[in-house]
Image: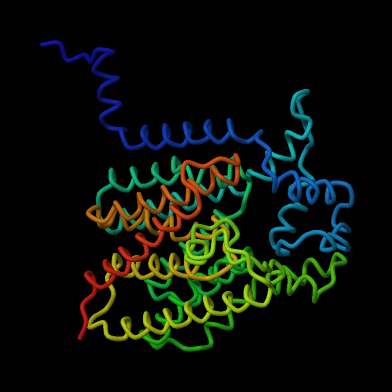
Amino acid sequence: MNNKKTINNIIIDFITNNYNKIFLITVILLSLIIRLYFIPWHSKDYNSFFKSWFIHFQNNGFSGFKDIYDTANYPSIYMIIICLISFLPDFSIEVLPDLSIILYVKLISIIADYFIAYMVYKIIKNYTNKEYIALISFACVLFSPIVVFNSALWGQMDAIYSSFVILSLYLFYKEKYTKAFLIYGMAFAFKLQSIFIFPFIILLYIKNRFHFKYFLLIPIPHIISSLIATIFGANFIKVLTVLGSQSYSNLSNSAASLPALIFTGVLFEQFYKWMFMTFFIILAIILCAIFLHIFIKQNNKLNIDTFILWALTISFSMPFILPSMHERYFYIAEILALIYAFMKPKYAYITILLYFSTFSKYLQYLFENSYLSVIPAAALMLIVFILLIRTLIRENKFE
């Protein structure tokens, strides 16, 4: 018998023994190619804001902090990153003279895509103890059209703060509260919309009875980054309060939400508009009180799947009910929905409905076209909300 391996056998053995690594490398390379394809696309936000902020720091260096907040309304931690990357080498091509700017700006969010994918992989691996399922979940995050469009096409930063939210939730489940609150503080420092998960943290506080002092850790990252910006000339009060500066007076800002479902196309005087906005805020508070009642009635310690379901339901419900929401504000819920679909495949249809509705609003904003107008999309989101509440009741055990 000939014991020598043929080239054919060597190749087959290599693929068999290294299949997971080959799959992982392939996914990373293909997902990078897709993102590189979308990078040259200019969004309205890039043209109006991101590009001018980058050029401002490119021209002024750290002294640019002195007057950047005359036009910018993004938090200091993000501006510090923009300032730092503005020092990177400048390059361009004839058809795209600002290639380096748009690449650097979008690269921040693209890196966050891969961090989120890793966190999803880690959670699913721990839950299923099956490498191949975890790898598929990793790929689903990176090839999710919402994830790709948000970072590589739009250049938005939802992946950044959401990655910290997902990591903080993982640490909350592990009851590593110091790390969890600091990481959540990082999410809060990047984007106020991280507050959509905050009601769930309150529920955990009441249920698990950990010390209130941990909440004092949340503002630390934002305060530190604000102090850094102040050292280079920014106004400390203006920088510190920039998180709350993105205020709107519309009942809905293109989100497929409950206010959009009820009042799209209806014209109000400003007084009545504010009245209804207050109504939806009160409605969200009432819903949080109901969640608290249900949560306290739980009879045992949360399993990781029930933990994710609670976080998903709350992070979805807040932007769905609150007024003045953008379509991007469901980003945390979309990642959690993907995680839950791998934990409980029988509920994957909820994730599909959620993604279909939110992605239709992405298309409407980015390309001024949509396969689904706001009212049908909001109606679909109402169905998702009802399904999540029903699933929450079904999957929980109460006294």
Looking at the image, is 214 positioned above or below residue 95?
A: below
Q: Quadrant of residue 152?
A: top right
Residue sitting at x 25%, y 73%:
393
Given residues 356 and 36, the one toward you in this image is 356
Q: Residue at x 30, y 58 (%)?
A: 126
Name the side, left or right, on which 31 lies relative to 192. left
Find residue 305 and report its horizontal and vertical position in percent: 29, 65
Rendered location of residue 109, percent (x, y): 60, 49
For the point 52% across and 59% down, which residue is it? 162
Residue placed most toward the observer, 285 or 89: 285
Question: Residue 85 appears at what percent x and percent y?
Answer: 74, 47
Marks counted in the figure total 0
Q: Nearer the viewer, residue 258 or 106?
A: 258
**Which image quarter is the N terminus in?**
top left
Q: Work out whether 259 lies above or below 145.
A: below
* Residue at the far left in the pictured view: 1
Q: Quadrant of residue 235?
A: bottom right
Front in this rendered view, residue 264 or 352: 264
Q: Is residue 232 above or below residue 295?
A: above
106 relative to 207 in the view: left or right: right
Task: Give the side of residue 374 with respect to residue 247, left or right.
Answer: left
